[in-house]
Image (spheres, rainbow, N blue to C red):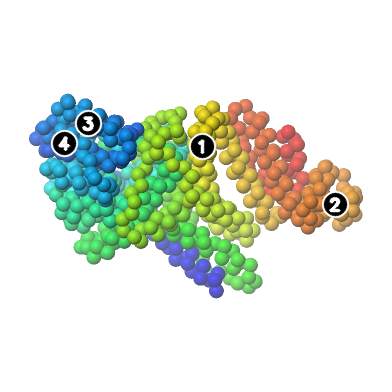
Amino acid sequence: MIGLVSAVVLAMTSVVLFVFGTNLLYLTFRAIRLPPPPRRRFVSDQEPVVCIQVPIYNERYVAERVIDAVCSIDWPRDRLHVQVLDDSDDETTHIAGKRIARWQRKGLHVDHVRRRSRNGFKAGALAFGLERTDARLIAIFDADFVPAPDFLRRTIGAFDEPSVGFVQARWGHLDEGYTLFTRLQAMAIDFHFLIEQPVRSAAGYFTNFTGTAGVWRRAAIEDAGGWSARTLTEDLDLSYRAQLRGWKSAYIEELVVPEELPVSIDAYRRQQSRWATGSFQSAFRLLGPVIRSTARAAVKFQAAIHLLAYGVGPVMLVQLACYPLLLLTLDQPGLKLPWYLTYASAISIVVGVTPWVGFIAAQTRRGRRWWAGLPAVFCQVVGAGMSLNTLLSLARAAKPGGVFVRTPKHRIVKAGQEWRNQAYVRVGDPRALIEAIAGLGALAMVPVALDRHQVLIAIYSGMFALGFLAVAGLSLVDLLEVLTLRRLGARALARIQRGAPVAALFGLASLLLLTAAQMREPFEDGYGHWLVAANLAATGHLHDPLFSMEDTWLPGYHVLAAAVLRLFGLWQIGALKAVSALLGVAAAACVYGLAPNVRQARLAVGLLVLNPVFLFTSGSAVVEPLLTALLMA
């Protein structure tokens, strides 16, 4: 009965994922076929009064940069009002104050706006500033964004259309090339701004102001009820309320405003937690009004998909939880799984491919070759690793509001810059421990699924295992590097950083080989070698009791195997398989040492470990792993 319920849940969740996956393909197809963006009026005269709001909270490293950028925007001085909405409680206030005074001496209208408390967090600060300006157009920039001088001249023209309530520019990335992790984040953001945003805007679907790098019409803000702190994504909430009131959005894809991506996994986890919590809160608050509205059915459908997008992670976690119950069901004799599980497997294939297709399309629309999007497969791995974090966010979203935890910025713009010794660094997130445990549990399902010929379950369990362990592992690496730098200095950190990639490579190789060793013995020879070794351990005589033959071919393996069986027990063929896995790791280490340079060494080890012949022999009780290790040595 439990197996049947699991099968039904798996089928239902697969349908949900199929809907999200096919919609992603639809958006991708529409984005590829989009015509060139319309030419918007470049405002060169009759400039309206604009207020630029810059909400900051403890941004000592980037406050000067963003203040200089917004104050350098090309706009008549008598029609430009800048508000630095400073809720800081550290030296940021002093840094910002000095920079503001400098621009005030140049004749610019810049206000340093302070509040008595952080009530409402960012939403409260924006509302507080709005009460202190008469401007009809409000531009907003987060502290890590760097707008170009022509930003207003390229956006304000969109408000020639009276129904436009807000204008959104595309995000760029200041530190995209810092690490592989920041490159993956950039790909995910590119998908949103090069696939989702342009299609939603062009098709008249509801979309969102992303909280920064855009301009609002004051009338739209006030007509929608103003900024609200009832959700942690005040931008998404206000965008939908405004569109429900009939206001439209304008998206300027060709206008790029660069921003700073989180450089640590713990900062990224907190950012995603806030975004996911706020998205769920907005969905709880707005789905009803959206469904009851007079909008087209397609608009309502796309709005629901948009608001519930973070729900994909928890739904996939539900599927992951069903897998062990299904695998146990397969052990029951005479039991057949329902026919719809076959369709659920096919659905899983579609869902698994669609994000990758979207990421590749986004990179081509960015002007890159299609293969630039291939590394985006790791975005799916990171997404799987973040699913537990998203599930916790869903639980927090049951209560409105919450604490707005800012994402720390360190003014990182190129590889090699150091952030671990700066302020605002928080490492040691306890959620990483939960992710590590979940990763080991998912990894344990892989050999069980393969043993029962459930390849798709094995693949998805492996993806979640890799995601959870990667996210948890990055948290551990950040923790060790921060502690090392602060207690032992930069030289010790440099040594750790040189060794970390190698440790990660061989850690993953060891996990993969040990996982293969947990599967049923794939070769008949394995049982034969175990029998010879067990007989040697029991009698002291190197002899094949099955065929009554003296065994003389590479007796070193049987001597080693006999010693292992004496230690762990004569019947423990699993111990021999584990030894083979360790010998496989030793062979990989020899290959690494033989390579002429580090890059080729990593590639060679990766190709070796992913070779099916090496993988399965290194997980079996056979002679080859020892022979390979000796030859490599």
Residue 289 in picture, x, y percent from top left: 24, 62
For the C terminus, the image quarter is: top right
Whole-Å distance between the Cαs marked 3 and 4?
A: 12 Å
Disc 1 marks which residue? 483
Label 2 crowd bin: few (<14), some (14–19), many (20+), radius 10 Å: many
Secondary structure beneath dot 4 equals: strand
Disc 2 marks which residue? 537
Nearer to us: label 4 or label 1: 1
Mark with earlier residue (4, 1): 4
Whole-Å distance between the Cαs marked 2 and 3?
A: 81 Å
In the rendered structure, which amino acid carries the disc numbered 3? Ile
Whole-Å distance between the Cαs marked 4 and 2?
A: 86 Å
**430 lies left or right of 289:** right
Whole-Å distance between the Cαs marked 4 and 1?
A: 44 Å
Nearer to us: label 2 or label 3: 3
Whole-Å distance between the Cαs marked 1 and 2?
A: 48 Å
Residue 148 in view (yes/no): no
Label 1 crowd bin: few (<14), some (14–19), many (20+), radius 10 Å: some
Residue 389 in view (yes/no): yes
Q: Residue at x 55, y 74 (%)?
A: 1
Asked whether the residues under the numbered discs 1 and 3 touch, taking CB atoms below 8 Å apart as contact, a structural biologist would say no
Disc 3 marks which residue? 100
Secondary structure beneath dot 2 equals: helix
Q: Residue at x 52, y 33 (%)?
A: 487
Disc number at residue 81? 4
In the rendered structure, which amino acid carries the disc numbered 1? Leu
Mark with earlier residue (2, 3): 3
Mark with earlier residue (1, 2): 1
**216 lies left or right of 584:** left
Using the image, determine if residue 435 lies above or below residue 611: below
Disc number at residue 154? none
